[in-house]
Image (tube, rainbow, N blue to C red):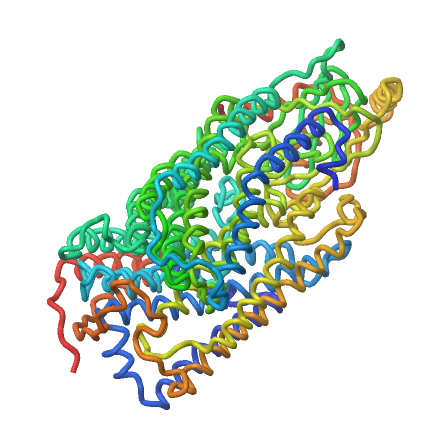
Amino acid sequence: MSLFGLLTPQAFIHGPIETGAQIIVIVAVLVTVLAITYLGRWRWLWQQWLTSLDPKRIGIMYILLSFVMFGRGFVDALMMKSQQALAVGAPGYISPDHFAQLFTAHGVIMIFFAAMAFMFGIINLVLPLQLGSKDVAFPLLNSISFWLTATGALLLNLSLVVGQFAATGWLAYPPLSELAYSPGVGVDYYIWALQIAGIGTLLSGINFLTTIATMRGHLRLMQMPMFTWTTLGSMLLVIFAFPILTVTLALLALDRTLGFHFFTTDLGGNAMMYVNLIWAWGHPEVYILVLPAFGIFSEVVATFSQKKLFGYTSMVVATMLIVVLSFMVWVHHFFTMGAGADVNAFFGIMTMAIAIPTGVKVFNWLFTMFRGRIIFATPMLWFIGFLTTFTIGGMTGVLMSIPAADFQLHNSLFLVAHFHNMIIGGVVFGFFAGFTYWFPKFTGIMLNERWGKAAFWAWIVGFLMAFMPLYALGLMGVTRRLDHIDVASGLYTQPWAHWLFDIAAAGAAVIALAVLFQIIQIIVSIWNKHKHHVGENPWRSQGPEWQEPAEPLHERSARGVAIGAVAALFGFGLIWHIWWLAALALIGILLSLITLPKPEYAD
Amino acid sequence: MYLLQSSGIIASQEASLIIQATLLMLIVVVPVFVLLFFFAYYYRAGNHKARYSPNWEHAKMDELIWWAIPLEIILVLGALTWGSTHALDPRKPLPSTVPALQVEVVALPWKWLFLYPSLGVASLNTLEIPANIPVEFHITADAPMNSFWVPQLGGQIYAMTGMDNRLNLMADKPGDYPGYSANYSGAGFAGMHFVVHAVAQKDFEAWVAATASTSPVLDQATYSALRAPSTEQERTYAYRIDLYHAILKQFGH
């Protein structure tokens, strides 16, 4: 066994397109480091940001991490869409294995590092203020959580430079993800990036739930703003669901690293167990993301209808019902596994039952608009875009909750269209609305509305172009994850098939334009900050977070960064079987937890 | 659109289920869209004719109504789900006066092997069946998880190592129907499609006879070669061993 485990110079050598990605990553890191050095900002960065325990600064770092990861995941999406448009009856330009890495990385990045990081960013910024508290329950733990998330993101991107990423799909179903079929380090990158980030998420869940439980002063539960309520629901789900993910991935790691047989094909291993476990986490995960977005929309629709939120009590009840029901539906992700009709029917009916509280929420939002004075600022546009796309996605979701219908729709592009309907229309639009809505609260600057509206319209048009054709392609029998479409498959010859792929690719290009508008929006707003200066409550919102100024906190500690860095070495050691490195790093993590210091104060 | 141009009795029931459920849901979805766009337009800030009630935040009766509407739709859909899930259970034999043709399906890395145990023939990436006669598929894998799917005949079911899954389908007219793997199984996944040839009973019998007499024999050695990852052309075999159960048993279940 060598000193560097499985790591050899070969791990740095890739095919031409992957080498391009490798060079881009290396250049981006070098340029960032040189720029900070040139500007003499290392000390400032370290003291004011990287070691800060102020939830507002941690929140902003989460959002920046989310933007970077969204950029990476979006490039993956553009490559997949262009490949699929070019590879109808032709091989296209991306190899099958690279294509599989793209769709795996896209899913993992968008869920764990784009959406989750954006969510925790907004929660860090807004939740303490909504409770009338300056801080979270455990400030240092909050920093550690952030750095564990950042470490997961780092490991994932490191796979572009050295080795490769998993080529299994975003949930890494065995036996494909076992050594027998995936012998490289790709799945190990997947496991350890998610394990480390997942621990961070679990700790965040505990932190924010404790914050809501203990730091809300005289605020009674039924007086809490809707965003706080939905965050409470989401954090409950984190606490119950994430340990399942940790255990599932640990079992897979034991299989791959130490030759266990939990999910292998031989010696009694059972891949179906993995599929059950991963979805027992995976389905609540969807609600972990969408509940806070629901909360944001509740704040937005009331503010911009210039009315109180309709049906507050119903909203709270509906939220908590969704929390409970979301643990009872996981089998709907694999009706096609062969369970009996009783089991499938039960999980189908439980799934459609979630449509009841969700439907109530939709009606309450609509009747908040009723007899209001609606102002169509950008956050309100995101809300209307959300309700439109989410209603379509909800309908196709209920359709797929009928097992016999799902037998035909499952694993097709219809499914892909459905969950992008929910995740983009629900989660992403929600976080965009929250970002625009609360931006002035923390900066005193209003984001430029003209560019914001342009971005909204480009997003909604691009979204409909990119995903509505996938419903039709799904009904044509086109499965997901095809790196090319053979002429002999019969899919190519159906009328419109080719055009639908082209429209979907063009839709992705329109979304790219929308993202460009958003970047311009942020730059223009900050550049002309005097013109965009509006003070802390430009929307004249009634929410408690708007009533008090957000004062900076000065506590800081380097322990979060340190634990993140050592966790990165730990993960790297396990991925490449460099046992001495993993062992030393593990000792380092334990020591740094035993000797937790009191926070220092910034100069 | 293969899903709606069904040529099998299961596929056509699934297609009408999809349409029926969609129409039911439109009872809620259409009013939501109408209300959304009407409220957004009529209660815009510029319309001073519209009534403005900033403190109207609660109305027990109204809220009861919109707990009740989705509840009722879901009750109806739930009944539909219970009934259709049992009626279209993939394990359930199809009603017929003739016994079902037994076909054993093995998902291999990146091809499909079809065995006809009672007829002594087998085929790779092509599936010959008689039209208007039910077919009972026994489905397993000697590969990562795949999903056996012929959209025009009916819904899919997973092909997994050590598992003996069941699917009952019937083509109700002769024709060529493409089939796929619907679950990602590795680099050759996009090439894992096959064609189902549904033919008249006498043509099927002729195919069996010709295949049995002219095709090479599928023995353990030939099969072992097929286990290696590859994409292959269509071909046929004659065979005499109980290959399917040997494949099932090698995974120790």
Q: Is residue B149 above or below residue A35?
A: above
Asked whether the viewer can see residue A250, the reply is: no
Q: Quadrant of residue A369?
A: bottom left
> Where in the figure is residue B122, as x and y percent of width and height?
75, 26
- Residue pushed farthest top? B97
Residue B28 versus residue B39: which sits nearer the camera? B39
Give the left or right position of residue A69, taking residue A514 as reference.
Answer: left
Residue A582 versus residue B181: which sits nearer the camera? B181
> Where in the figure is residue A120, as x and y percent of width and height?
33, 60
Residue drawn at 61 percent across, 18 percent down: B92
Residue drawn at 33 percent across, 49 percent down: A234
Residue drawn at 56 percent across, 44 percent down: B29
Give the left or right position of residue A19, taking residue A477 as reference.
Answer: left
- Residue pushed farthest left? A598
> Where in the figure is residue B49, as x and y percent of width and height?
49, 62
Asked whether the viewer can see residue B253, the reply is: yes
Give the left or right position of residue A558, taking residue B48 as reference.
Answer: left
> Where in the figure is residue B165, as x and y percent of width and height?
58, 25
Residue A83 versus residue A119: which sits nearer the camera? A119
Q: Quadrant of the C terminus of chain A?
A: bottom left
Residue A387 versus residue B8: which sits nearer the camera? A387
Q: Quadrant of the N terminus of chain A?
A: bottom left
